[in-house]
Amino acid sequence: MDETLIENVGKDSTLQSQQLKELYESLIELREKVETQQRDVVKLREENAQLKRENNQLKRLPLFVAVVIEKLPDGEVYLRQQGNNQEYITQVSDDLYPLLKAGTKVAVNNALSIIKVIGTTYDARVRVMELETSPSATFEQVGGLKEEIEEVREAVEYPITRPEVYARLGVEPPKGILLYGPPGTGKTLIAKAVAHNASATFIRMSGSELVHKFIGEGAQLVRELFELARERAPSIVFIDEIDAVGSTRTHDGTSGSAEVQRTLMQLLAEMDGFDNRGDIRIMAATNRPDMLDPALLRPGRFDRIIEIPFPDAASRTEILRIHTRNLSLGDITLASIVSRTEGATGAELEAICREAGMIAVRESATSIEEEHFDAAIRKVRHEMPEQDVRMYL
Ligand code: ATP
């Protein structure tokens, strides 16, 4: 009897340990399953959050862009919506109100409440404008053009630096001045030097870029150009290649020309709204004065027109002296270079000096000699050396 009992007990314990082992294994399996499911839950929660965000994004209505025209008391602002030019007054939250000023761009919802500040319109302006607070160019860097420079200074610089003289004598300085002449004769250089002397901000806008790159935005950019000039006064606005916006030929009735026409109208409107004696002076440059719309040249607009011609021999000598100032010249006279550069512009003369220097560097010469200038003149002015010319004869 005792033996049977012992045998059974032995059997039971083997059975129990077998069952325990099985239970333990299924426990581990279950734990792994739970962990996998927990990971799935986290993943699904993330997906859910992402879908909710996307859903909200899709449900949100688009915002309109408006510009603050004026800040009114008691937390109100006067806005103008871009595109349709609708104007309205709206109440602003206390946290946004201090961030706003005239010209700030804001996003408004359907109920015309300001949702956020987009920033000033500055970003759009810098795309097309070059701005220098006080350019480093001076009149010492301009060769020749003495009379022209004096005329420009009278019309642009002195009204800023000595307004009292004009006021005392009752003289109205010209509102805008137009420089015309071949490319590279120093028009931009003169405008920058005037800005330097008057300690004024120099703002340059290119007419052709305005028309080709910013289709549909021309009038707005002209508005912003003058806004910026007012903010940064005293300032000199320099519109290069003005023929691109102010040419008679472009008014041919197509939609592109209508856009150019709108840009021109905006420019004329801005000029008409200006005080002649103010500290914002307007300059423009063109290579084609014959193509300009007469509306631009009427009194009160670009009413002083100054020709910047090709430099004569004396001016070429001065220009060469300026651009060879820092060069280590050998035994050469500027007169021989002057006589061989008839009809060259200031920009070409500058390029000749630079190129002569580069050729000398290439040859590791100790100084820049006549032959370096010879080669440079040929390269810049696309002249062929004599033996090459003989080859073609
Ligand atoms: P564009 O019509 O192409 O705009 P521009 O007449 O405005 O030409 P600038 O840009 O002023 O010409 O000239 C280009 C460069 O040529 C100047 O930076 C300057 O180095 C040189 N240059 C032109 N004219 C003169 C000059 N009279 N004296 C000295 N340097 C000159």
Image: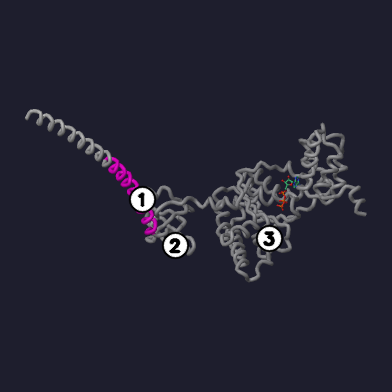
Which structural element holds mark 2?
A: strand
Q: Are marks 2 and 1 in contact (CB under 8 Å)?
A: no
N-terminal-most mark, 3 or 1: 1
Q: Secondary structure at mark 3?
A: helix
Name the residue type under label 1: Glu
Label 1: few (<14), some (14–19) or many (≥20) C-alpha neighbours in 10 Å: few
Which residue in the structure is indicated by mark 1? 47
Whether residue 306 sits left or right of residue 175 in the image: it is right
Amino acid type at mark 2? Glu
Residue 386 magenta: no
Residues at circles 2 and 3 in contact by the CB criterion of under 8 Å: no
Q: Which mark is residue 87?
A: 2
| Residue at 55%, 59% in the rendered image | 220
Colour convention of the picture: one colour
| Marked residue nearer the N-terminal end (2 or 3) | 2
Foreground residue among 344 and 17:
17
Q: Is residue 32 magenta?
A: yes
Name the mark nearer the viewer: 2 or 1. 1
Give residue 243's mark. Answer: 3
User: How packed is label 3: few (under 14 Cα within 10 Å), some, or many (20 or more)?
Assistant: many
Q: Quarter-wise, where is residue 325 in the image?
A: top right
